[in-house]
Image: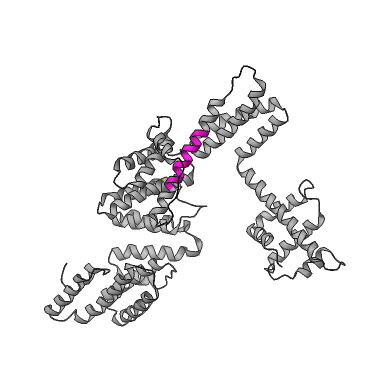
Amino acid sequence: MHATFLLQIFQAIPPAEQPAMRKFLQSPFFNSRADVLVLFDLLVREQRRAALTTWPKEEVFAQIFPGQAYHNLTLNHLFAYLTERLEQYLALVEMQRDGLAERLYRVRAFRRRGLTQLFERDTQLLEKEHTASPHRHAGWHLFHYQLQNEIFSQRIIQRRDGATNLQGTVDALGQFFLLENLRWACTAHALRSLGSPTDYRLPLIETAKEAAALATADQPALALLGYSLRALQNPDDVAAFREATALLTKYPDLFPPAESRDLYMAAINFCIRRQNRGERDYAQTALNLYRAALARGILLENGVLPKYTYNNIHLLAQVTGERDWAYTFLEQYRNYLPLADRDNIFRYNLAIFHYRAGEHSRVLELLRTVEFSEVFINLDVRRMLLKGYYELGEWPVLASLLDSFKAYLRRQKDLGYHRESYLNLVKFTQKVMRVADKRVAARRQLATQIQAVKAVAEREWLLEKLGIGS
């Protein structure tokens, strides 16, 4: 069955939602064609048999139009019509999920149809509810502008004295513009830090930055985005970082969860950059920010904690020495991990937990069944296995691992200096195995070679195995 868009939409809708969709199609207001409902029911039936993509169009036509000769154009038109209805259904569902947007369209309808009392009643309720919200992000100001625009359009007709809410309307529009420009500027700088090659042009961003620098006490969202942008642009701007984190703590609900998460991650990335420069106190600050975000529930995406977030939090807990909290975290958030990778991710992190305690037997037990497609996690798993086998004296298994590790690294062409660093780890581990019980002179000679090479993973550990410190 070749109806690409129709099948894409239909298969994206969970079976539990199909009865609601059928009711939509049964409504004469949205659909007056009986053949559309027949096609929908056929799709539901064949989906249970997993036969949609291989279902011949001639059979589809015969079941919808029994006794008629196959006509491809007629069937294609039916596919297109059902596709449009399903698209309309999705749009209506989204509108209903956003209750404020639906009510805004309602007051617009009241205004256009001259239903003044209903208009006044609903706009007053909407203003009251909207103002009571703790959010003051760009989306809040956009809705405020749209609502004030409706009120302005009503008053400009009714009032002869020229008294309107024009100032409040344009103020809301201005705040939306400033906040949204700053938010996108933060996003652009975050992408640059991840290696994005694009040099984004941000129109009038300087105006937004100037406004943020002059933000008043009743504009904390504007100030927060301004400080966040400064910290993203300059890892030496500690003052901006401190102001941003102070505002995050003082006004936890200024932004909806997704935007709050971005602000927390900007602050955490500032800490990581400082930590990577040797300022270890920032590891604790980053962990505290993660904990605050966890407590607010904003790190979850559709109820799922991303695996890299889980990994990063655990590593920070290990770095800061909070092992008890680290173990509690691993267990507490295990069931929030993506289902497909849940066991692998948990076992990998639990292996790191025991690795840090020198419990190599437990590490090997956990990692023997762990499989990841991600290259850097694979490197880390093999590194821990390598050290575990060595520490436990499992020489035949270690020799086999070193051979497979070397072959794996040679297949990876895009690792940069990591490839050379791990290849040197493999090479020098093999050499350490050969000279570990030899005379001091032989071990010193190998230690000199290890120290002379620029990129060597686990350099300190190799020197330790030779009985010679760096």
Q: In this view, does 82 lie to the left or right of 134?
A: right
Q: Measured along the vertical axis of the image, is residue 235 above or below residue 354?
A: above
Q: Which residue is drawn at 26% across and 54% down?
A: 277
Q: In this view, does 72 lie to the left or right of 222?
A: right
Residue 373 place in picture, x, y as percent: 44, 69
- Front residue of 362/197: it is 197
Q: Give the range drawn in magenta.
A: 173-186
Q: Quadrant of residue 449?
A: bottom left
Residue 362 place in picture, x, y as percent: 34, 69
Q: Residue at x 61, y 44 (%)?
A: 97
Q: In which quarter of the image is residue 10?
A: bottom right
Report how many numbered discs are placed on residues in the image: 0
Residue 218 place in picture, x, y as percent: 43, 29
Can you see residue 9?
A: yes
Q: Residue at x 15, y 81 (%)?
A: 438
Q: Residue 235 in magenta?
A: no
Q: Measured along the vertical axis of the image, is residue 79 above or below residue 149?
A: below
Main secondary structure found in the magenta portion: helix
Q: In this view, does 298 lie to the left or right of 397?
A: right
Residue 216 place in picture, x, y as percent: 40, 30
Q: Residue 174 in magenta?
A: yes
Asked which colour scheme the image uses, the reply is one colour
- Front residue of 258/413: it is 413
Position of the N terminus by quadrant: bottom right
Position of the C terminus by quadrant: bottom left
- Front residue of 83/128: it is 83
Hey, which residue is sitting farthest top in the picture?
161
Q: Which residue is drawn at 37% across and 35% down?
A: 213
Can you see residue 251?
A: no
Hey, which residue is sitting farthest right in the picture?
67
Q: Measured along the vertical axis of the image, is residue 186 above or below residue 120?
A: below
Q: In which quarter of the image is residue 130?
A: top right
